[in-house]
């Protein structure tokens, strides 16, 4: 007689089941930890990108206001408020708390409150400042810091002005200028004779700003000497920037500058020669 053998399938034992569940639990814990870490990293990276983006966007918007500020830039540190003006309009930018506001006004329009939702430029702004000490040299320095949660970003940059010196009081087109090369102390200098043709006299002690553009680099302008019609010009009233080639001179009329009358002054360098081809007047304003 043939003997029939039965194969019995006993399945997993309780011990094997417990070991399998434990192994699966360890694997799941590892996977969940990895997912959690990835989520935190994504969230952190997203905040960092948002902070950088907000800083760059806000910085660019204020820079665009500054580049055409040919009628003056003022900044008050106590109120964190800047006024940026050109011929046709002015902008008021102010940091209140952590919110940066900006509003546009007409050139002669009275300023009103700017702290409304419609004028909000950016949130999360920790600091905003402008250094206007080099405005006469053709640039201002802006600094800004933005913070969002634990992430922050900051930027400081020189913003160079476009058409420096073409301000609202410019009457250059009503002045006839003559440039003469002279030799003083064995150096060539440039003498300017300016005849104003505004049709009216300019009173004594009127503030006059004259801006020049140098076409050559590495020239150290060290003196602008009044010859007639202009009061003595101190070194503090001469601003020259080698980077931009802009020379700004603040002076006063020493007498009434009548229609058809002239004033004269001389421009010189500390070393080397200066001739009329090296320098030209870009604006005369009062």
Image (cartoon, rainbow, N blue to C red):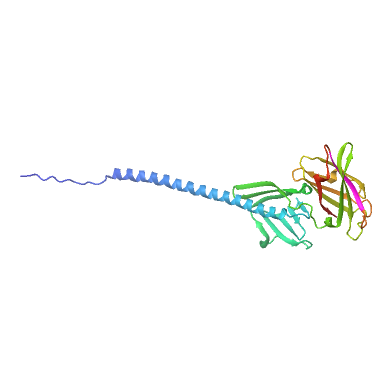
- Magenta stretch bounds: 262-269
Describe residue 38's horizontal placement relative to residue 224 as left or right. left
**In the image, farthest residue toward the left:** 1
Q: Residue at x 72, y 53 (%)?
A: 66
Q: Position of residue 38 (x, y in %)?
A: 48, 47
Check residue 268 for magenta coloring: yes
As rendered, which of 120 and 85 lies closer to the eye? 85
Q: Quadrant of the C terminus?
A: bottom right
Query: At 62% across and 47% down in the image, what residue appears?
Result: 152
Residue closest to the eye, 243 or 78: 243
Provide residue 272's location: percent of width, then percent of height: 82, 37
What residue is drawn where x is 87% and y is 53%? 207
The residue lying toward the viewer, choosing from 162 and 149, is: 162
Q: Is residue 50 magenta?
A: no
Res. 113 visible in picture: no
Q: Is residue 265 left or right of residue 133?
A: right
Give the percent coordinates (x, y) of residue 181. 87, 44
Left or right? Give the position of 50 relative to 263. Answer: left
Vertical order, 166 against 31 (above or below): below
| Image quarter of residue 176 | bottom right
Where's residue 112, x and y in %? 75, 62
């Amino acid at each position: 007689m043939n003997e029939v053998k039965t194969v019995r399938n006993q399945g997993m034992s309780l011990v094997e089941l417990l070991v399998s569940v434990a192994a699966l639990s360890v694997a799941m814990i590892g996977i969940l930890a990895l997912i959690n870490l990835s989520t935190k990293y994504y969230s952190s990276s997203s905040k960092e990108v948002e902070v950088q983006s907000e800083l760059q966007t806000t910085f660019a918007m204020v820079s665009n206001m500054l580049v055409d500020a040919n009628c003056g830039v003022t900044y008050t540190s106590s109120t964190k408020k800047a006024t940026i003006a050109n011929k046709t309009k002015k902008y008021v930018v102010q940091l209140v708390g952590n919110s940066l506001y900006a509003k546009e006004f007409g050139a002669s329009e009275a300023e009103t409150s700017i702290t409304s939702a419609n004028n909000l430029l950016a949130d999360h702004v920790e600091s905003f400042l402008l250094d206007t000490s080099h405005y006469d040299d053709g640039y201002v320095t802006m600094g800004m810091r933005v913070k969002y949660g634990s992430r922050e970003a900051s930027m400081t940059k020189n913003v160079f002005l476009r058409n420096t010196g073409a301000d609202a009081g410019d009457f250059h087109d009503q002045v006839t200028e003559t440039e003469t090369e002279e030799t003083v102390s064995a150096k060539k200098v440039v003498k300017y004779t300016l005849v104003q043709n505004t049709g009216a006299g300019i009173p004594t002690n009127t503030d006059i700003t004259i801006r020049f553009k140098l076409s050559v680099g590495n020239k150290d302008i060290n003196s602008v000497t009044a010859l007639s019609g202009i009061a003595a010009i101190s070194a503090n009233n001469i601003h020259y920037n080698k980077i931009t080639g802009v020379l700004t001179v603040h002076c006063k009329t020493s007498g009434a500058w009548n229609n058809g009358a002239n004033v004269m002054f001389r421009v010189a360098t500390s070393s080397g020669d200066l001739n009329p081809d090296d320098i030209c007047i870009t604006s005369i304003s009062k």
